[in-house]
Every structure is written in C-alpha cells, then in structure tokens.
Image (tube, rainbow, N blue to C red):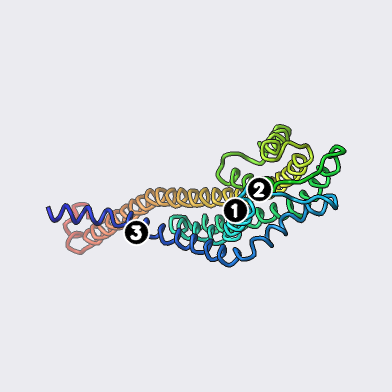
Amino acid sequence: MRKTKSKADSSELPLVAHLVELRDRLLRIIGTVLILFLSMIYFANDLYRILAEPLMAHLPADSSMIATEVASPFFTPFKLTLVLSIFLAMPMLLYQIWGFIAPGLYQHEKRLVFPLLATSTALFYLGALFAYFVVFPLVFGFFTSVAPDGVAIMTDISKYLDFVLKLFFAFGLAFEVPIAVFVMVWAGISTPESLRAKRPYIIVGVFVFAMLLTPPDAISQTLLAIPMILLFEAGLFFAQKFANQRQEREDDEEDDYEHENRSTERDTTDGNMSEPVDAHNDMDEALDREFAQAEAEEARLSEKDMAPGNQSNNPDK
C-alpha cells in the first residue's frame, strides 16, 4: 500500500506544480492590475474628461454631457479606471502567459511565439490609438452635425463610455488581422496563394465583421473595414515571405537527405563490388602458386633424369 501511494503522489506532483505556478502567475497579474488601479483611481474624473474630449470638442457651446442614473457620476469613472488598468497591464498579462507555456514549446516555436505576442500587443494598442485620434473625431463630428434642429445633444456619460469601449475593442481586435493571417499560414491551416485567391470574399467578410463590431453607422464601419483590408494585405505579405523561407529550408533538408542516401548507396555498391574482385585476386594467386609448384616439380624430375646413374642404365646408350 505504501508503494502504491508513493507512486500516486509522484504522478500527481507535476500537475500540482503546474497549478501552483498558474496560481502564482494569476496573482502577479491581479497584483499588477490592482497597483495600476490604485495609482489611477484618484485621477478617475480627469481620465474620463480626457476620454470625453473627442465628443466635447464637437458639442455646441450650450451643450454638455449628462448623468441619467444616480450612481453614474461615481461608477462610470470607476469603470473606466478599472478597464484602463487591465488595458495597461496587458504586457504583464502576456508575459505571464508566455512564461507559463514557454517550457512546453520547442526552440523554433519559442523563437516565433514570443515575437507574435509582442507584436499582437503593439498592434492592439495601435488600434486603440487609431480609434481615439482618427475615428472618434470623425464619428462624433458627423453625429453632431446631422442632429435635427431643436434637438439638444446631451450624451449620457455611461452610454458614452460603453460606446467608446466597444470601439476600442473593435479596432484593437481588427488590428490583429496580420497576426491571424500569419498564424494561419504558420499552422498550415491555409496558404498565401489560397488567401490571395479568396480576397474578394475576405473583403466582404471584413465589412460584415465591421458592421457587427461597430455602432450602426456607415462611417465607423468603413473606418474599421479599410484598415482591416490594408492590414490583411500586410499580413499576407509577411506570410508569403515566411512560406518562401520555410519552403527553401524544406528543399535544403530534402537535398541533404537525398545526398546522404546517395552516399550510403554508393558505399554499399563499392563494398559489394570489392568482394568479387578480392575473390578473383585470391583465385589468381592460387593458380600462380600451383603453376610454380608444377614448374618446380618438372625441374626436379629433369635434374633426376640428367644424373650419371640414370644415363648408364639407359638401354639405348
């Protein structure tokens, strides 16, 4: 019973160790988010004012934002600060994920996965910045300019936060298109030639995707779809370069393999050909020895016949 229990404990130790490591990394992520949140909660109202500047810049002089719920003035900046803390902690989150999965990866996978994580983080931030500095001014300027006469534009602070967070997420996710294209080619799910042939369908799908992620207006949908198409082309370009490099590497490995096989076959053929040659040489040596022995025997007999005793016994003489 003791031996069985010790075997069970030893088999459970790796799982327990992984769970402990996962817990530690989750605690680090939560601690990072908490530290960022506590450091920014004092400036929650200022952060919301910065977030609302693209809309406030296009509101009429006598208009302002409003709070239609009792707790909105407190919970809306609080929610913004919490989301911003998670957003800023994204590098730490990805680093902890990388540290957890890296020991189980091959060396060539490590060289590829880490740059993909770093690039995906940078692209997500770039998408959010593109939404804030490019999309928000255009969208809010259009919305405020088409308001009917007699309608006072007074946007609720909670509705505005939900609207901009949705756009931030949509554009951050849309800017991950090059990573998605590259991963599909890397994993063998598709090829650059196949994606290039399906470009018309992909463009239609991009506009449908933009329609689902953005508010129901053509401007934000178009502003999301166009960068996605350009990023798809960029991802296709890098995926093609990667596919070409991988094909060259596979061709080199195949050539090396064929060269090794030819060398092995040549060595085997040379070894098989050397065996009959050695046998033929041995036969010639044996014949030479027999011929030498016959000549020696004949010379000995001739000398015996030439001896004086043998000549006197000859009847002809």
Spatial distance from mark 2 to mark 1, Cα to Cα? Answer: 9 Å
Can residue 197 be seen at all in this image of the molecule?
no
Spatial distance from mark 2 to mark 3, Cα to Cα? Answer: 44 Å
Amino acid type at circle 2 is Ser
Q: Earlier in the sequence, mark 2 or mark 1?
A: 1
Q: As rendered, which of 274 and 32 lies closer to the eye? A: 32
Secondary structure state at the residue bearing disc 1: helix
Q: Which residue is denoted by mark 3 in the rendering?
A: 17
Amino acid type at circle 1 is Phe
Q: As rendered, which of 16 and 282 lies closer to the eye? A: 16
* Residue 309 quadrant: bottom left
Spatial distance from mark 3 to mark 1, Cα to Cα? Answer: 39 Å
Q: Which residue is denoted by mark 1 in the rendering?
A: 75
Report x, y in % for residue 195: 67, 38
Q: Which residue is denoted by mark 2 in the rendering?
A: 158
Amino acid type at circle 3 is Ala
- Whether residues under marks 3 and 1 lie with C-beta atoms below 8 angstroms apart, the answer is no
Q: Nearer the viewer, mark 3 or mark 1?
A: 1
Q: Is residue 90 left or right of residue 273?
A: right
Report x, y in % for residue 230: 75, 45
- Whether residues under marks 2 and 1 lie with C-beta atoms below 8 angstroms apart, the answer is yes
Q: Dot 1 surroundings within 10 Å: few (below 14), some, or many (20 or more)?
A: few
Q: Earlier in the sequence, mark 2 or mark 3?
A: 3
